[in-house]
Amino acid sequence: MATHSEASQKNNHESKKDYQPRMVIISGPSGVGKGSINNILRTHPDLHLKYSVSMTTRQPRNGEKEGLDYFFVTPERFREAIEKKELIEWAQFVGNYYGTPRQYVEAEMAKGNNVILEIEVDGATQAINTEKNVLSIFLMPPTLKDLASRLQGRQSESPEVIKKRLDKAMLEVPLKHNYQYVVENDTVQNAVAKITDILRKEKAAPYDKTTVYDKLKKMMYEIVHEDYGFFVKNWAANIKNLKDSGLITKADYKNFDAEEKLVSTLTNRLYHRNLAHGNFQDLHDKSYVRKEVQRLMFKINFFSIAQKYDE
């Protein structure tokens, strides 16, 4: 009979296998609220989050501490780190350099921790294109006016610097489609709830309950079964005709499940849309979901297997 200690070790081992530590990129325009959100996320021990400390050549702000907020270095030391490939990513912003030291990130992931990279869009693009086990989230302000108000509220930068940050933001926002998820930061609490669900949905953290995404998909099965059985059968018939005409392979036809495809497509579209610009709590309301499905159904291509998840 296993002792309590042995059982605990077994449960911990099984929990470790249930999730895959990730390099979690939370990026977006300067002033969008990355720091505030990350500060709250780090208070949730079940998410196994560690904060990556960036290297920078800029001067410390009031209250910032060496090794805790940033590693403050000279331009010469930063260039050396680039040459020695000690950085996962790096970028120049408003006259200063910022980068993510590789050694710390890899060590924490080896311990089973997710590592948050709170980085600028330029650096995030590098990491997305070159690193493995990346989970990328683009943080959006509700409006550019809100972003300007947040930057001005800092009262730590000149109007010239604020203008540069806003100009850069207008170039960065169109790059949001390079990320796996886009999350609107209308309030810090809502943004934290969305990101927490993403981490659990992506199995970046152990979780023994149902995520918002899972509940939405279950609800979507019910709605499709109740309201759209005809369309499921019609789609399946259309795809069979494509197979019989030689326009798709037998393997693609064999793997095609019209109901599963419809449910997954609708779930992904609605989930991603509400992350980006909607009330996340609405996804618990079946009447709201049913109404949105009525609109989304017009965007399904019932003459193809491939579907776009984007709006």
Image: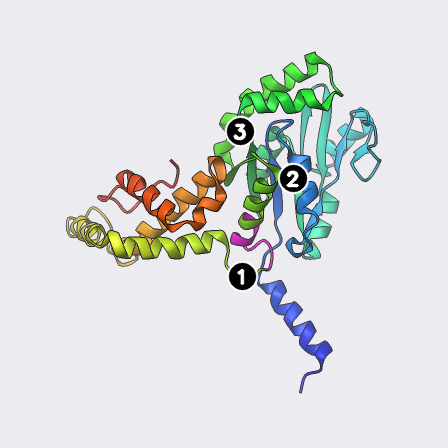
- Confirm or deny contact between disc 2 and disc 3 (CB under 8 A): no
User: Who comes first in sequence, dot 2 or dot 1?
Assistant: 2
Looking at the image, residue 176 sits to the left or right of residue 154; the answer is left
Q: Which residue is mark 2?
A: 37
> Type of residue at label 2?
Ile
Distance, label 3 to label 1, CA atoms, is 30 Å
Residue appearing at x 57%, y 45% in the figure: 195
**On the rendered image, what quadrant is the C terminus found in?**
top left
Q: Is residue 205 magenta?
A: yes
Q: In terms of image quadrants, where is residue 77?
A: top right
User: Who comes first in sequence, dot 2 or dot 3?
Assistant: 2
Q: Residues within 10 Å of mark 3 (few under 14, many from 20)?
A: some
Q: Which residues are magenta?
A: 198-206
Q: Residue furthest top?
A: 160
Residue nearest the observer in this picture, 128 or 249: 128
> Type of residue at label 3?
Pro
